[in-house]
Image: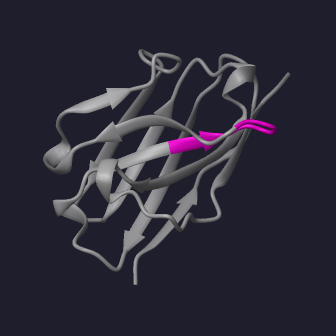
Amino acid sequence: QVQLVESGGGLVQPGGSLRLSCAASGFHFSLYPMAWFRQAPGNEREWVASINSGGRPTTYAESVKGRFTISRDDVKKTVSLQMNSLKSEDTAVYYCNLAGRYKRDQWGQGTQVTVSS
């Protein structure tokens, strides 16, 4: 069955960087677009970034454009999110999922990102 396991979160100071990773299994990873989402306390889950099969195109929410970079490794079956210039408002639990109409109702455990001094 489909399994998505996020990792790489942690506590970082404003202006710092983190790299999140999502390990996928149970489906033909290279054929599907993937995405990152996040959910801050008290807020609904929101889309952050997507990457198409083959690695292009990539799209980003306006709030993270120019600071975050999504990438994928079809050999390792992973999708990553490089987060630079982090702000307090980036604090959230981050999740990966398939993108667009392929997005699954089931979510992984996510990885906590806390940006604080």
Taking the spot 28% from the left edge, 75% from the top edge, the residue there is 27
In this image, 74 relative to 7: left or right? left
- Quadrant location of the N terminus in the rendered image: bottom left
Dividing the picture into quarters, in which one does residue 26 lie? bottom left
Left or right, 40 with reference to 59: right
Horizontal side, residue 104 vs residue 19: left or right: left
* Location of residue 50 in the rendering, given as x and y in whole percent from the top left corner: 34, 39
Q: Is residue 42 magenta?
A: yes
Residue 47 versus residue 55: which sits nearer the camera? 47
Quadrant of residue 12 within the rendered picture = top right
Looking at the picture, how far across and down is residue 49, in whole percent? 41, 35
Residue 103: x and y, percent?
39, 57
Residue 74 screen position, x and y as percent:
22, 60
Residue found farthest to the right: 117
Does the segment drawn in magenta span residue 4? no
Magenta residues? 37-43
Which quadrant of the figure contains the C terminus? top right
Give the residue drawn at x 19%, y 61%.
30
